[in-house]
Amino acid sequence: MYDLRIGIIGAGGMGTAHAKNIVGLGAEIACVHDVRVDAAQGLASAVDCDCATDSLDTLFGRELDGVVLTTPPAVRVAPVRMACERDISLMIEKPPAFSMSDGAECASLMQGREMFAAVGFQLRYSPLFERLREMLVGETVHLARTVCTIDYYLTFGMSPWFLRRADSGGPIAEQAIHVLDCARYVLGDPQPVRAAAFATKNMAHDRPEFDAENAVQIAYELDSGVFATHMNHCGTERFAFDVELIGPHLRLRADVTENRIVGYLHGEDIAEPAPASNSIGLDKIGAWLEAIDTGDHSLIRSPYDDALHTLALVEAAREAGDTGEMTHVRGHEI
């Protein structure tokens, strides 16, 4: 049980999942905010919360230990500023911001604050990818490949803003970002250097309200010397997150749907199921709550400042997809 009071901003699918997880872990939902007050009221009722509002002032007027931010990515700076002014910890769903300029502004607001600012990259808490990261310690890796597939353009079973570039940033920011960040995590968090990308929408021609690309191919370089590719498709029947690494003495692939690592390492064949839990026994929400409760910063595997390196790669890849030219990554300085 946690004697913590948490606010939720965004009462959609992610906000609902996080709120129920927080209650299940023994903390209290103190207030729910959404621009649609009926949505806020519905979620508040579901988690036995007496505060539902469409006013950020009302939410931040409550006594809060933390806020979970699950809005579209363009809605970051204002709630982050309000949280920072009050030293209220933040769990921010990916991406950390819509742009690097917004991200740098948010990071600047967080500087010197007595708060925990985490980004919701749940694959960093996956036992599968924690194990892959352990296997790569001390190994030489030259190439990385990631894949993300999802069914949005087949089923349209998603929030409409996911497929509007002006709201979501497109599939590189809305989907690919998870496995791009995961590749950085398993490789020890190198920083991106440059990116090239091709992207097109060649599905759902009868749905002009959706302009996000369904097919994306990215090539990029990390400052560790690893060259990587990412393939993304959001009109495919089956969901997949795959991460594959290749080096002189290894070829290892971690597959979320199969939940195992296969390949070889120093001549030994590998076919290893994921451990039952990670080394801390906590998911991203549990780790964030525990960090607030104990003051242990090491529990946060995706601090905001590091997550901006993944956002920088996303921004470079989006620009490269628009221009057709290799784009050098623009980092951030606080």
Image: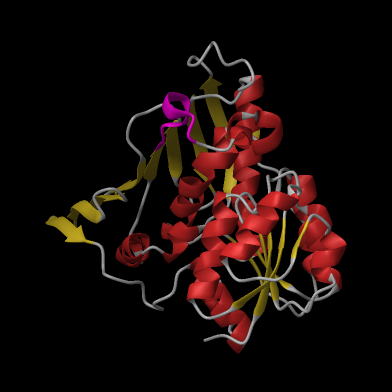
Q: Name the residue located 64 percent from the left edge and 20 percent from the top edge.
A: 209
Q: For the magenta stretch, what is the residue range?
A: 149-157
Above or below: residue 71 compared with residue 47: above
Q: Is residue 20 visible?
A: yes
Number of numbered discs visible in the structure rendering: 0
Q: Is residue 10 visible?
A: no
Per the image, is 222 magenta? no
Front one among 182 and 328: 182
Above or below: residue 215 compared with residue 45: above
Q: Name the residue located 62 percent from the left edge and 77 percent from the top edge.
A: 28
Per the image, is 153 magenta? yes
Front one among 32 and 136: 32
Residue 107 placement: quadrant:
bottom right
Left of 54 or right of it: where is 306?
left
Left of 86 or right of it: where is 253?
left
Left of 294 or right of it: where is 59?
right
Left of 203 or right of it: where is 3?
right
Residue 297 placement: quadrant:
bottom right
Front one among 66 and 27: 27
The image shows residue 190 at horizontal and vertical percentages of 53, 56
Residue 315 placement: quadrant:
top right
The image shows residue 67 at horizontal and vertical percentages of 69, 68
**Way the structure is coloured:** secondary structure
